[in-house]
Amino acid sequence: MKAILFNLILKLSQSLSLQKGRNVAHFIGSIMWKLSKKNKNITLTNIKKCYPILTLEQQNKRARASMDAALMNFFELGCLWKKQTKVESYIENIYGIEEFQTALNEEKGLLLAAPHMGNWEVLNLVLAQFEKFAFLYKPPTDKKIEELLIKYRGKSKALQIEANLKGVRKIMMHLKDKGFIAILPDQRPKSGQGMFAPFYGIPTYTMTLFSKLAVKTKVPVFFAYALRTEKGFTVHFEKSDNDIYTNLETSVAYLNKKIQTIADKAPEQYQWTYKRFSIQPEGEASFY
């Protein structure tokens, strides 16, 4: 049922312009804000925990905008995934591209941290224009939705690597082959596959895979994200500090600190609808 609904909405959004898709997302967001207690609670809880200095009115406004942005990510897909669509027509500017291209030209392989910021599907389409691009993905629980995602994302011709033990081996092979790979570093890991590190001053269970790869391979590391603008998107590439290579604890802490810095640039475009803090240190009560 979920796959059928996903496909129907995707088909519908293909008939809409980028702006009209965003308008529909905003309209549905206003309904969800009133009726979806679960999504509202998750989003508002995250905002309150990470921005306690805001007034309740400001927290509600930011949470409401974040829910809109999450829906926009989805309703923009139909437009972006059309066969005839050229993603460049929606990109207003790309910052840091020269430094990123220089690092790729070194042919050492490259790791790219792509947080849940803005529209990461736009970023995927931009990255797919470079050779030897791969990205790690966590398969949804619904196999039919996974098939649809693989189908539509496959149009970019990027190598899609599933996040499992076999996938880690593929990542290492891809880096040895001087390719580059994008990973969502703020995706909540399974128990035993992460460690606690500060995120907005909160001990947050964070994936260690990205930092382990950086410390082990010492390949160039960049952060990248695509921010929504009034008419399209801007894409940003930022080179990592050397802290990412130091040791596992320092690397993971730096990773979260950098993601926080990026999220603060446009807080409403970060994915606060996600249960980032669902795993708490032993003895601590659940936020949700």
Image (cartoon, rainbow, N blue to C red):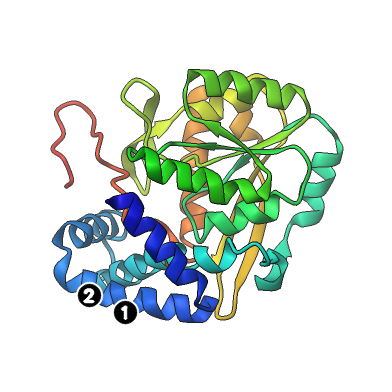
Report the amino acid beneath label 1: Phe
Q: Badge 2, how many Cα within 10 Å: few under 14, some, many 20+?
A: few
Report which residue position mark 2 lands on.
31
- Asked if disc 2 and disc 1 are in contact, CB closer than 8 Å, the reply is yes
Residue 225, image quadrant? bottom right
Badge 1 marks a residue whose secondary structure is helix
Name which residue lies at 68% across and 44% down.
157
For the question of whether residue 247 can be seen, the reply is: no
Which of 225 and 171 lies nearest the eye of the viewer?
171
Residue that appears at 76% across and 56% down:
97
Residue 24 pos. (x, y %): 38, 78
Q: Residue at 39% of width from left, 23% of height from top?
A: 193
On the rendered structure, is 173 left or right of 264?
A: right
Query: Is residue 225 shown above or below 285?
Result: below
The reply to whether residue 283 is in sight is yes
Q: Residue shown at 34%/27% (left/top)?
A: 190
Q: Is residue 233 above or below residue 248?
A: below
| Residue 22 location (% of width, % of height) | 44, 76
Dot 1, how many residues are within 10 Å of its Cα: few (below 14), some (14-19), or many (20+)? few
Where in the figure is residue 205, as x and y percent of width and height?
A: 34, 33
Q: In the drawing, what numbered circle is on residue 157? A: none
Q: Position of residue 18 (x, y in %)?
A: 53, 76
Q: Secondary structure at mark 2?
A: helix
Question: Is residue 112 left or right of 187 when viewed as pictured?
Answer: right
Amino acid at the residue labelled 2 = Ile
Q: CA distance from mark 2 to mark 1?
A: 7 Å
Task: Look at mark 1 in the image and give the residue it sits on.
Answer: 27
Q: Nearer the viewer, residue 126 or 256?
A: 126
